[in-house]
Amino acid sequence: MNVTDPMLQPAEHLDEPRLVVESGVAARIAALVVPVLHDLDLRLVRVKLSGQDGTTVQIMCERADGTMDVDACEVASQALSPVLDVADLVPQAYRLEVSSPGIDRPLVRVSDFVRAIGHEARLELSQPVAGRRRFRCWIEAVEPRDVRINRIDAGADDEAILSLPLDMISEARLVLTDALIRATLRGAKGKEPLPEDAASPSRKPATKSKAKPIRPSGVQSELRAAKRAERRPSAVLRDASSKSARLKGD
């Protein structure tokens, strides 16, 4: 489980670049929120727009060491909400969700892959390697330009051990397994809260009073104002300008 090249061990810092980035509106939101998070000693993991149950803008963020907690999510939400409202990048009313990456986190930086060595992951590439673009695998090692994997989904005639170029990875995330949960709990021993607040795949934000191991963390805030051209004067405008972040229960 050691990194093949000991010189590769990345300095985990706020400015470590991401390998996987957004496109379209999500990319514009990412560019806007990165400096705000940086001022809070946080870094962006991912921006995702979802249309389920109304439009949701999900912003995953973390400290440079990969940890996150509900209080930090709340602070980030309070800082990001007015900035996003003024920028008006989303044309319809939406809900802002700020959360930790969770245990089964997206892998977006070299340091994420280093910490994921020995664990199960799902990877998707921008171009095929060995005739495939999607892999279910164990992360074996991280090399200067590649990640070495041991394929779980390899057939009898397939090569199990492959090196995939890091710059070709378009999507990657850990798979929530018992081994991953145990490793996270061991790493969290003696710390409160747990790293990444031991979030589950559901990503539903937890309240401070219910922040327990193997429960998700995050905070949501309602952004009820539509784009400026459709805003009504007086009461509606006052309502939009007075919104504030709040924690939601499961």
Image (spheres, grey):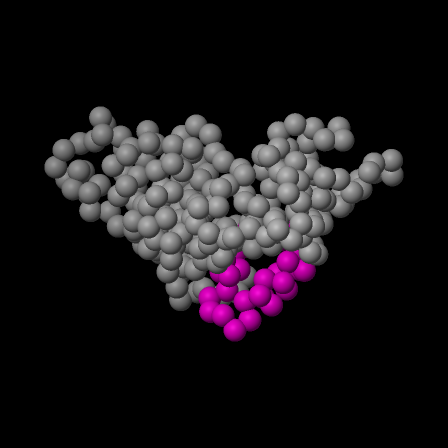
- Residue 205: name its quadrant: bottom left
Residue at image x 38%, y 32%? 28
Q: How many marks?
A: 0
Find the residue positioned furthest to the left.
234
Q: In screen coordinates, is 201 left or right of 241?
A: right
Task: Locate the C terminus by quadrant.
Answer: bottom left
Residue at image x 33%, y 31%? 89
Position above or below: 35 against 93:
below
Residue at image x 34%, y 38%? 32
Residue at image x 45%, y 64%? 211
- In the rendered image, residue 119 lying in the magenta stretch gets the answer no
- Residue 118: name its quadrant: bottom right
Find the residue positioned furthest to the front.
7
Q: In screen coordinates, is 149 left or right of 221?
A: right
The picture places residue 161, in percent across and down from the top left corner, at 78, 42
Magenta region, residue range: 175-201
Q: Name the one closer to the observer, 209 or 42.
A: 42
The picture places residue 201, in percent across and down from the top left corner, at 55, 50
Find the residue positioned furthest to the bottom.
190
The picture places residue 133, in percent across and down from the top left corner, at 68, 31
Q: Name the one closer to the observer, 231 or 132.
A: 132
Q: Name the one closer to the observer, 11 or 28.
A: 11
Answer yes or no: is residue 189 visible.
yes
Q: Name the one closer to the observer, 103 or 233.
A: 103
Answer yes or no: is residue 92 visible.
no
- In the rendered image, residue 176 lying in the magenta stretch gets the answer yes
The picture places residue 194, in percent across and down from the top left corner, at 50, 64
Task: Locate the N terminus by quadrant.
Answer: bottom right
